[in-house]
Image (spheres, rainbow, N blue to C red):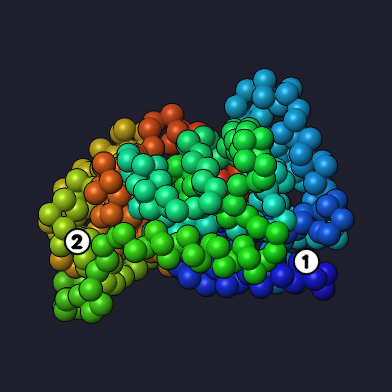
Amino acid sequence: MDKVLKELVRISKIVGEDPSYIQGGGGNTSAKTDDGKYMYIKASGTALKDMSSKKGWRRVNIESVVSIIQDESISRLETYARETEVVNRLLFACDDDVADGSRPSIEAHLHSYLDTYVIHLHPSSVGAYVNAKNGKAELEKLFSDLDLPFIWVRYADPGFLLAKRISRLIKGYKKEHGRKARILFLEKHGLLVTANSGSSCLKLTQKVIARCNKGLVKPKSGCVGSVSKELIKEASVCIGKACFDVCGEYGVVAYYNSDIISWFMKNKSAAKMLKGTLTPDELLYSNGPAVWVGQLDWRKLSVSIRAILDKGEKMPVSFLVKDVGLFVTGEKKIVKMIRDVVTSILFIRVNAIKFGGLAFLNKRQKDFINKWESEAFRKSMAAGANKKCD
């Protein structure tokens, strides 16, 4: 195996094993070859922990990738025509023997402007800041001792527009400071860390996440209370009936509880904190925030679900039942992925609200993600979802 690819697989597996670092098929990593001609990057929808020498990555020609950002004609295309063109150009930039239908991460062109190794994650601790209205100011205080500042990236639609914004910021940063930034915080998105070696990149990533964790509140270990099997079954049946009433089919209803889930449910503002969608991943994997269920009445829940759909939102697949726990509907192969995403977002909500309030995605931002083919592809590659009720 190529030494660069070997190192990429190593660091990807390390960060990919921790659900507080990344959830589902989100995040990505990359590494550039010594000659600067090629870049190995995680394949779209592949879980970082599942990368290996044979799968989960694509090798792209860096010059071809950079040309996508530099091509002004792409910027003039209609939104979805533009994103389709970017996907096709990224596939055209691939230079490898991979024949499994996988695509390079849609953020490959973003990585091309960064240092040799790049780790992009959605850590829960970082999410507490980047999803808060005053998150940037709080991070500036938290990292005030850095020799060179981090870059704060205002929210941009994932894909081409985000890559364009970061390319401009990187160029401006290098002009001002004489080198590329090592740490980038992406509003409503996550963390980007870049360095000239895999070990340095990994070490810096862990350091940033650990520092972000220090200023946050966390649940006490073992705070999950006892819940009877009868109550769990009653809640499961209630949710199953409500979903069937709305979309006409029964699916798996999986039950989960944890310190974070129990801790969130005890918060007096729990229902209020679930009023909006925070991140693209929350929308992609769980179709929006978990639905708060204060009373086990399937008819009332059915009315609540229909009200959500009437607003143009997607069919919810996660439900927080007061004093019981988290219930997730869908196919078996995706429910745990949804659980991880929802659990991370619950932790983020409790902490972000302290930093000036929660910064929800607006309707236009949500509409872009819901219609974006690349995100649908990432989700399908990660697991597949409940198609009829999606």
Q: In which quarter of the image is residue 158?
A: top right
Q: Quadrant of the N terminus?
A: bottom right
Q: In this view, does 161 lie above or below 96?
A: above
Q: Residue 265 carries which label?
A: 2
Cα gap from disc 2 to disc 1, whole angstroms: 45 Å
- Foreground tag (2 vs 1): 1
41 lies left or right of 151: right
Q: Mark 1 points at which residue?
A: 4
Residue 242 percent across, percent down from the top left: 25, 53
CA neighbours of label 1 inside 10 A, class few (<14), some (14 to 19), many (20+): many
Secondary structure, mark 2, is: helix
- Give 154 or 366, whichever is nearer the viewer: 154
- Report the amino acid beneath label 1: Val
Residue at image position (23%, 79%) is 222
- Give 14 or 92, whichever is nearer the viewer: 14
Residue at image position (66%, 28%) is 81
Q: Is residue 297 above or below residue 323?
A: above
Name which of mark 2 and mark 1 comes first in the sequence.
Answer: 1
23 lies left or right of 296: right
Residue 328 percent across, percent down from the top left: 35, 62
The outermost residue toward the top is 76
Q: Is residue 300 visible?
A: yes
Residue 84 percent across, percent down from the top left: 68, 35
Residue at image position (55%, 63%) is 204
